[in-house]
Amino acid sequence: MSTNDFKVIDEQYEAGRLAMRSYVIGFVLSAILTLIPYIIVVSHMFGKQSLVLAVVLFGVTQLLVQVIFFLHLSKKSKPQWNIIVFIFTVLIVAILVVGSLWVMYNLNYNMTDVSPFNSNEGYIPQ
Amino acid sequence: MTTDILNTREAKSIFGFWIYIMSDALLFGSIFATYAVLHNNVFGGPSASDIFSMPFVLAETLILLASSFTYGLASLYAHHHNEKDKVVLWLVVTFLLGATFIGMELSEFAKLFQGGSSWQVSGFLSGFFTLVGTHGLHVTAGLIWMGSLLAQVLRHGLTVRTIGKISNLGIFWHFLDIVWIFIFTFVYLMGAI
């Protein structure tokens, strides 16, 4: 076995150690980012508005944590295309979700209030 | 070693799979939007805060998160250490955690259904079952895939092809965990506020 082989094995081992670190950090951070919003929601620690905001922030943070530490998507990712496609998808999903909510909110708002449930589900009053 | 080969042919397969995952993200984005639009339309039936058991959902969430972590360990032993036994061990652990998650989800569905909260009751419940059910179907597909991958690793060992497949299923599995974070946040936590 030449010294070169040892070097390759060392590099593999080092890469494995780094990957292990990445998974452990991702797991611990995700668990924390799951437990904190759970506790503040179940104990009704803040007002409604701030709870909604906090929960969304924790969710988005955990998305980033998992994308970086589990999917290993970063600026350094080998095929640069991965991250470009990812950003494009995030953009489309955001337009889709925000757009739907916006349009449907206006639809509800502009509709005559026909139902005691204030819904757009086609309730016909007697 | 293996990672050098992964940079060529298998890299293309992984990129192709990544594109599929992104199209799946669009599918989930659409049904999330549908749920967001419908979630207040309870039509006199139960609302989100009436029917969900939060400790149960927290347990589901942590189990799926743990399975994402154990899958990472399997992937790590395949890519960097080439230790077949440990890969098989962590794949089995991941499979069991995933199966537990699906079992819990099915029992939640059965309980809701028996309690009269089926998907036919209101727009909210239709949206809920569509969203959470689609995620559950994906996890089930992932479990079937994981079973077949286990058989291939046991039979052929850690070859370039099986390691490439481990990478692809890894993307799928971590993606499903990310989708679940959004379900946990927007369906369950928001419903309990």
Image (tube, helix red, strand yellow):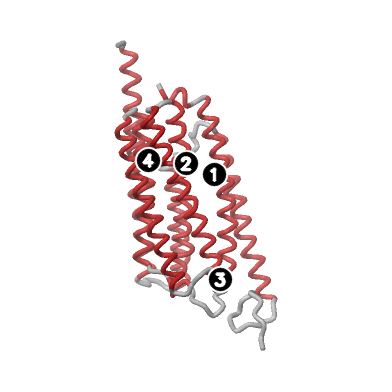
- Distance of mark 1 from mark 2, alpha carbons? 8 Å
Q: Amino acid at mark 2?
A: Ile
Q: Are marks 3 and 1 on the same chain?
A: yes
Q: Amino acid at mark 3?
A: Gln
Query: Residue A76: x, y in percent?
Result: 48, 34
Identify the residue under disc 4: B72
Q: Is residue A98 left or right of residue A9?
A: right
Q: Residues within 10 Å of mark 4 (few under 14, many from 20)?
A: many
Specify the label residue B171 is tagged with.
2
Q: Quadrant of residue B173?
A: top left
Q: Residues within 10 Å of mark 1 (few under 14, many from 20)?
A: some
**Proximity of marks 1 and 2: CB atoms separated by less than 8 Å:** yes
Image position of B64 with respect to B158: above or below: below
Identify the residue under disc 1: B21
- Distance of mark 4 from mark 3, alpha carbons? 39 Å
Pair 4/3: label in front: 3
Q: Residue at 66% x, 76% y: name it.
A: A122
Identify the residue under disc 3: B120
